[in-house]
Image (cartoon, rainbow, N blue to C red):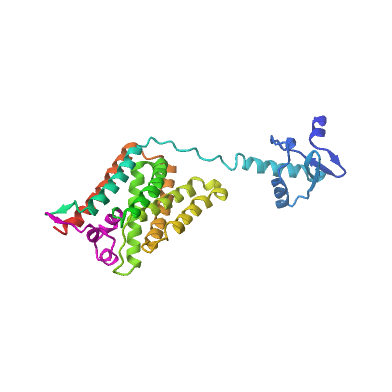
């Protein structure tokens, strides 16, 4: 026993050298954090660095106390930080998201070519469905949803389909298709609602970009909760990426509605936080629930347009 002690502690005057072996950790080198542990307990220490590495020395009369405190620290921080959560491999139907994006493009082409009629007369789809602030405050709540399906021109549409489609695919992979589209509609609608209450009565807004920024916010919220044990290294990524996207894509152009983009993102973040907390506690949303949420999302859009068009008939 004495021979073993000589291999793990080497006497140097009134100081003894602590090595990982005597502490009971597999490392070959002293951990710098041990000095913080000793300092917190007001245990004197010295650091000696030579060719064999870093050596930590403590007074002989404080050796037992130093070992006790360091071992306590190692036990309490065993396997910390925890490993990254495993990547989610969901059986998602990518065809569903592609179909929705194609339908959105087809809808744009149809209303632009005046092929959709009501009672054999042309329907002014933009007047009926745009997010007009005064009318939203007046109770025409369907505009919160219908405005998300309208686009000013082909460039506006393609930008949302390409960029927004990418973020929607990422969100579907994380939480499921049906839940993703439902949260997308909620974030976009709430963004339009808040924007309607801060703009002038004559302010008009169209486009799915409010919902796209809602998706970005949802992804940011999901990441903050999923990687909360690693936030020191990971939290700037989703938040920084979202802010960069808002600056680069959300504020360019004379017709860009910065307020709608900002509110979409701001509502998306808490939706992502709440969703990830619920998933962490109750597990992933099942396929049946995802399917029902997807169908419900479709009914919301169809119902909103039904109410909008019913007022014209």
Q: Position of residue 57 (x, y in %)?
A: 80, 44
The single residue placed furthest to the right in the displayed view is 13
127 sits left or right of 95 in the view? left
Q: Position of residue 142 (x, y in %)?
A: 25, 57
Q: Is residue 122 magenta?
A: yes
Q: Position of residue 278 (x, y in %)?
A: 41, 45
Which quadrant holds the N terminus? top right
Q: Find residue 135 and report its image quarter.
A: bottom left
Between 83 and 182, the residue placed more toward the observer is 182
Q: Position of residue 176 (x, y in %)?
A: 37, 41
Which quadrant holds the C terminus? bottom left
Residue found 82% across the figure and 43% down from its top: 60
Residue 255's place in the image compared with 178, above or below, is below
Q: Is residue 246 magenta?
A: no
Between 126 and 263, the residue placed more toward the observer is 126
Magenta residues span 120-148
Residue found 76% across the figure and 50% down from its top: 43
35 sits left or right of 92 in the view? right
Residue 260's place in the image compared with 14, above or below, is below
275 sits left or right of 294 in the view? right
Between 71 and 285, the residue placed more toward the observer is 285
């Amino acid at each position: 026993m004495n021979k073993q002690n000589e291999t793990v502690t080497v006497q140097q005057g009134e100081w003894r050298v602590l090595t990982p072996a005597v502490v009971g950790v597999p490392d070959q080198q002293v951990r710098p954090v041990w000095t913080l542990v000793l300092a917190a307990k007001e245990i004197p220490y010295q650091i000696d660095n030579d060719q064999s590495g870093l050596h930590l020395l403590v007074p002989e009369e404080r050796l037992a106390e130093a070992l006790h405190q360091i071992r306590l620290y190692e036990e309490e921080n065993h396997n910390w930080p925890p490993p990254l959560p495993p990547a989610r491999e969901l059986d998602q139907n990518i065809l569903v998201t592609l179909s929705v994006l194609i339908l959105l493009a087809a809808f744009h082409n149809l209303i632009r070519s005046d092929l959709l009629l009501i009672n054999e007369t042309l329907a002014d789809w933009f007047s009926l469905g745009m997010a007009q602030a005064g009318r939203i405050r007046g109770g025409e709540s369907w505009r919160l949803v219908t405005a998300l399906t309208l686009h000013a021109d082909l460039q506006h549409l393609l930008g949302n389909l390409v960029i927004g489609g990418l973020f929607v695919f990422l969100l579907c992979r994380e939480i499921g298709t049906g839940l993703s589209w439902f949260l997308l509609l909620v974030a976009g609608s709430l963004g339009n609602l808040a924007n309607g209450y801060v703009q002038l009565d004559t302010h008009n807004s169209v486009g799915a970009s409010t919902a796209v920024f809602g998706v970005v916010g949802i992804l940011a919220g999901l990441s903050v909760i999923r990687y909360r044990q690693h936030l020191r290294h990971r939290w700037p990524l989703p938040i920084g990426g979202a802010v960069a996207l808002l600056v680069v894509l959300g504020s360019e152009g004379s017709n860009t509605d910065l307020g709608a983009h900002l509110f979409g993102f701001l509502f998306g973040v808490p939706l992502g936080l709440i969703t990830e907390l619920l998933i962490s506690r109750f597990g992933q949303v099942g396929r049946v629930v995802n399917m029902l949420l997807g169908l419900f999302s479709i009914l919301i859009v169809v119902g909103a347009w039904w109410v909008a068009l019913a007022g014209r008939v």
